[in-house]
Image (cartoon, rainbow, N blue to C red):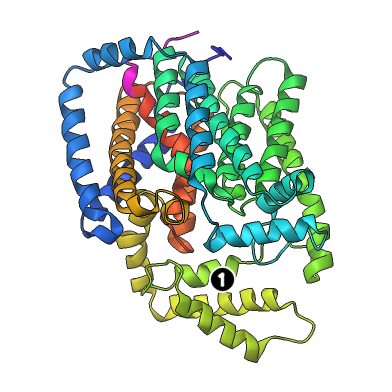
Amino acid sequence: MRCAGRVARRPDGPALVNVAPVGLALTLGYALAVSLLDRGDSSGGDVRAVAIVVAAAGLGVALRDPGALARTLGRALRYLSWMRIALGALALRLVWVLASDVTQTSDFAHYDLMAREISAGRYLVNPALPTGPSIMFAAHYLVFGYMPLAPQVTLAVLSTAQVLLVYSLLRKTTANEPAALFGATLLAIWPEHLLYVNLLGSDVLFSTLVLLAAWMLTLGSGSRSRWDLAAVFAAGVVLGCSHWVRNTAFVFLAASSLYLALHDRWLLTRRAAAVGALGAGFLLPVLPLLYLNAATIGFPSPTVSQIGGWSLFVGANTTSLGMWSKQDVVLIDGLVAARVAAREHRLVARDRIAREMALRRIRDQPGLYVWTMLRHKVALLWAGAAEISWAVRTSRLGAREAWVRATVNGFHAMAVVAAVAGLIAAAVRRQYAWDVRQILFWAALLTTVVHCLVEVQPRYHHMFLPTLAIAIAPLLSRSVREP
């Protein structure tokens, strides 16, 4: 899998290629700074504060002589290869899946229940939750019977595939082997990335699909127009499939379209053709969704779940800081019981009423809504690790949950500090080109904006753990090697 491919030509003006990396670095830095105002063991604030100080001090010392840092890590990485890293990552994930014996709770229990119902032929779409993950789990149950271990093993393989994709993307965009090995190794041992493979949810599957789509777009950046458009179309199909997993696939479609539309080596007609091919590919898996939604809820909704209004309602709750709360569920369910219209699907009515209530909340206290975005939501999305209780509490490590949580939060905080340094360093050294990394950086920024408006959870950054690994890797490279 040694993939030294073409490195995109760096545009004459550095402004455009640095907008997203610098913007993401500032966003991450802001999230860390604001998170320091929130202290306490429940949020991991104390561990995070210590980790930030340690990481910043360590980077400060190392960056006094970045060449020495690169040489030291380079010597360590000489004993690694992409194959050894992948085998190690897979072994860690399989051991965790086989040993954890976790009980699925919260949303993950719902996804598992939907998988059983889908395998029984009851439906393919559910207005309450995206069914993409459950369809994949149901396929396992049809083959192996009801055995959650089967899809968990597949999730471990998909998580390992992300490690390989990070390696390949870094090789293609930087032509720097140590940086590629470093980024892949980081993701292979990232605690949150590893722990989530035992959860029957959308996180691992969605992360894999959007990263695969970005990798496929590297195949569509050459000089063979017909084959390039086929690769772009295939990337669109993958993004369309990811839309069955999460509604935020639209964010990656927008970022990918921007990347293709502003490709600095293509004529305008070819850029238009590429954007069209991407959109056509995306539409292919979405068309069945339109039909199934029309049959289920009475109109051809393009979204895989009808929870946009509910998400906005939760996000407008300044008391819960835009996070899920039981009080919101009770309030909306009471309103739905009193106000549901005749012949209207109950979950569609619920979403409509939630949207109306969300807009009322925002109109009543617009300043507090904006303050919650700035003071809390950005930090909640990026500064802390995703909640690990779902993966650990009911597992064999349940008695050590506090220690696991501290480790996961500490690693995440140090990694985010390193990502800020990596993004800024690469921008200052003019190492960025208009390559597919831009898709991931722009998608991260757009996702931040989306979750400032709607519901937020630390878990929603999980799909960008590979992006953070890619952002950190350039710390090992002082210059981009031209093809």
Q: Residue at x 51, y 75 (%)?
A: 358
Report whether residue 244 is seen. no
- In the displayed structure, would residue 431 be above or below residue 99? above
Q: Is residue 415 left or right of residue 90?
A: left
Q: Quadrant of the N terminus?
A: top right
Residue closest to the far bottom: 338
Of residues 354 and 84, the one drawn nearer to the viewer in this rendering: 84
Residue 163 coordinates in the image, percent (x, y):
51, 28
Residue 195 coordinates in the image, percent (x, y):
45, 43
- In the displayed structure, would residue 52 be above or below residue 299? above
Report whether residue 224 is seen. yes
Q: Amino acid at mark 1?
A: Trp
Of residues 275 and 100, the one drawn nearer to the viewer in this rendering: 100
How many residues crowd around disc 1 within 10 Å: few (fewer than 14), some, or many (20 or more)? many
- In the displayed structure, would residue 293 be above or below residue 61? below
Within the image, what quadrant is residue 155 found in? top right
Q: Secondary structure at mark 1?
A: helix
Q: Which residue is mark 1?
A: 310
Within the image, what quadrant is residue 15 found in? top left
Specify the principal SS of the magenta part. Answer: loop
Q: Residue at x 45, y 30 (%)?
A: 188
Q: Decide whether residue 203 is among the magenta residues.
A: no
Residue 323 coordinates in the image, percent (x, y):
43, 66
Q: Residue at x 75, y 39 (%)?
A: 281
Q: Decide whether residue 478 is among the magenta residues.
A: yes
The magenta-colored residue range is 475-483
